Image (cartoon, grey):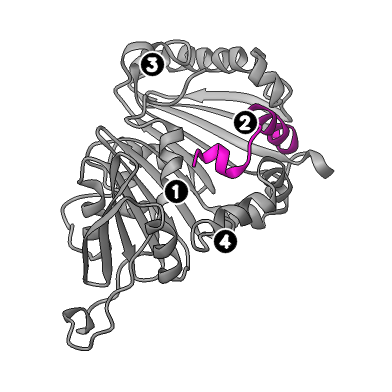
Amino acid sequence: MSSAAPPAVSRRAAFRMLAALAACRPSLDARSPIEAPRERLMIDSAVDLAPAAGLEWLAEVRCRELIADPVTRAPIGVVVPDAGFRTFADRRGGLDLRTAEELVVAGYRRSTLALLRTRFEPSRVEAAATSSAVEVSERTAEHDIVRFSMTVGDHAERVALFGGSLVALERGEPGPLRAAEYFAEGRLRRSHPALHAEPLLAAAALLGPAPLRIFAAGPFEGKWAAGAAGLLGGATAVGASMQPSTQGTGAGRGLAVRIVLLGGWGDDAAKAADRLRSAYGVLAADPLGRLTGLDQPIDGPRTSGDAGALCLDVTVDAMTLARGLRAATGGTLDEIIGS
């Protein structure tokens, strides 16, 4: 079953953006206008800085929460050992994904925006980023936001440092990053973040506050319309979540997975829900599904549907899933991200 919209930038390219996350230190010159008193930036949630306009897909991970949970800590260590996280942080000025509150990567038609909410030392991160840049330009500091553009390889990237708590990077055509800055400053009163506007607002409500969530907005066209037994062709949005479950015992603790498809299912909702369950069966039976244990769930799959939404719930073995993903990727964190 395919449940993701065609990204404007591939997932691999999106994760590559983490390698370039950087920030600048504002001037300490007392005469600088940035010394003037101002209101605190509004950065309680990174995902609430990603604009809804033009969004095609979005992934949100509450990193520290997943690492702290005993159900997910060991499986994460199988996919990416601590040494891999440490090496990644050392090369990026101390940006340790294990202690980050939140990582958001959002894909737009012609750009991708990455947001990492964590505490860091600006000078270290800036030095690590600029060391690999061909050119750094347009460096500015205002309203507690420091931003600059840099050329990495043959492409341009725009970086922003929000105080000392969030780093943002934009690749592709400019736009989403500036909107994120306005949201942080409380200046976009009539526009909405991605998960506060339809159709993803409804998808987020159905998924609930899980520590890992993925969203894609329709319409789904071309080969994507045939995904999920053809259900994507009639879907307006897709969402998926994963969170630790109390089901399972010992090392075989579970991960509760929920998939939702929004659309105008009307009186065909029950039949559509059956098709969704069949689509899961096809996915579970293929080699990757068997490798990750989707063919032997702890509980489910169970499907339900109404006129506006279809849901599939299944609990899978966390360690089996992790070992399968490790075997499928077979790389270090740097290799997985692609830096």
Looking at the image, is 312 positioned above or below residue 135?
Answer: above
How would you rate the neighbour count of disc 3 (Cα within 10 Å): few for under 14, some for 14-19, many for 20 or more? some
Which sits earlier in the primary sequence, circle 1 or circle 2? 1
Which sits earlier in the primary sequence, circle 1 or circle 4? 1
User: Which residues are drawn in magenta?
Assistant: 316-339
Dot 1 corresponds to which residue? 18
Nearest-to-viewer mark from 2 and 3: 2
Nearest-to-viewer mark from 1 and 4: 1
Q: Amino acid at mark 1?
A: Leu
Dot 3 corresponds to which residue? 224
Q: Is residue 319 magenta?
A: yes
Is residue 318 something one can see in this rendering?
Answer: yes
Is residue 249 something one can see in this rendering?
Answer: no
Q: Residue furthest bottom?
A: 30
Dot 2 corresponds to which residue? 329
Secondary structure beneath disc 1?
A: helix
Dot 4 corresponds to which residue? 99
Rendered location of residue 85, percent (x, y): 61, 53
Q: Amino acid at mark 4?
A: Thr
Rendered location of residue 148, percent (x, y): 26, 59
Please state if 257 lies on the left or on the right of 268 as rendered. right
